[in-house]
Image: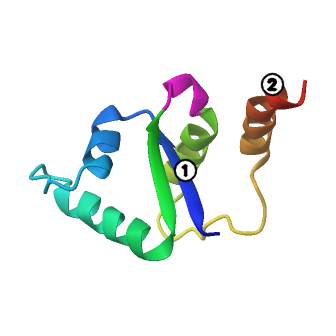
Amino acid sequence: MQKIILETDASSIVQALRFQDVDRCSAGGLLWELKILLQSNFTSYTVVHTSRSYNSAADSLAALGASLSLGEGPIVDSIPNCTRVLVANDLAPFYE
């Protein structure tokens, strides 16, 4: 994978990743690190703002991760059914 499109419902993150200015907010170090990772691992990347309603699959995965007990292993072998359904629903308009 050489090109990536990141979608987020956080417009401030989109702005921070699009501009080269140093962000002095509390998450500035993380944003700087993300920029470096994107630049060094992809030939091109795009960061776009999307409506929160299009972010249900990511929201589902985040909620699932937050509900895991400390020390519980990550889910790496398969996509959880709850997320599989959300992704299928997101893709449905493209296949109609």
Residue in view at x 14 percent, y 52 percent:
23
Q: Which residue is mark 1?
A: 5
Give, as a three-letter code, the residue at label 1.
Ile
Q: Position of residue 69 (x, y in %)?
A: 51, 59
* Quarter-of-image position of residue 85: top right
Residue 92 sits inside the magenta stretch: no
Secondary structure beneath label 2: helix
Q: Nearer the viewer, residue 8 or 82?
A: 8
Residue in view at x 69 percent, y 68 percent:
76
Q: How many marks?
A: 2
Q: Which residue is mark 2?
A: 93
* Quarter-of-image position of residue 35: bottom left
Q: Nearer the viewer, residue 51 or 70?
A: 51
Q: Residue furthest left?
A: 24
- Quadrant holding the N terminus: bottom right
Neighbour tally class for label 1: few under 14, some 14-19, many 20 plus, Cα within 10 Å: few
Q: Residue furthest bottom?
A: 40
Residue in view at x 89 percent, y 30 percent:
95
For this view, does 17 lie left or right of residue 55?
left
Vertical arrangement, residue 87 with respect to residue 26, above or below: above
Give, as a three-letter code, the residue at label 2.
Pro
Residue 51 sits inside the magenta stretch: yes
Q: Nearer the viewer, residue 80 or 37?
A: 37
Q: Residue furthest front?
A: 43
What is the span of residues highlighted in magenta in the rendered image? 50-55
* Quarter-of-image position of residue 93: top right
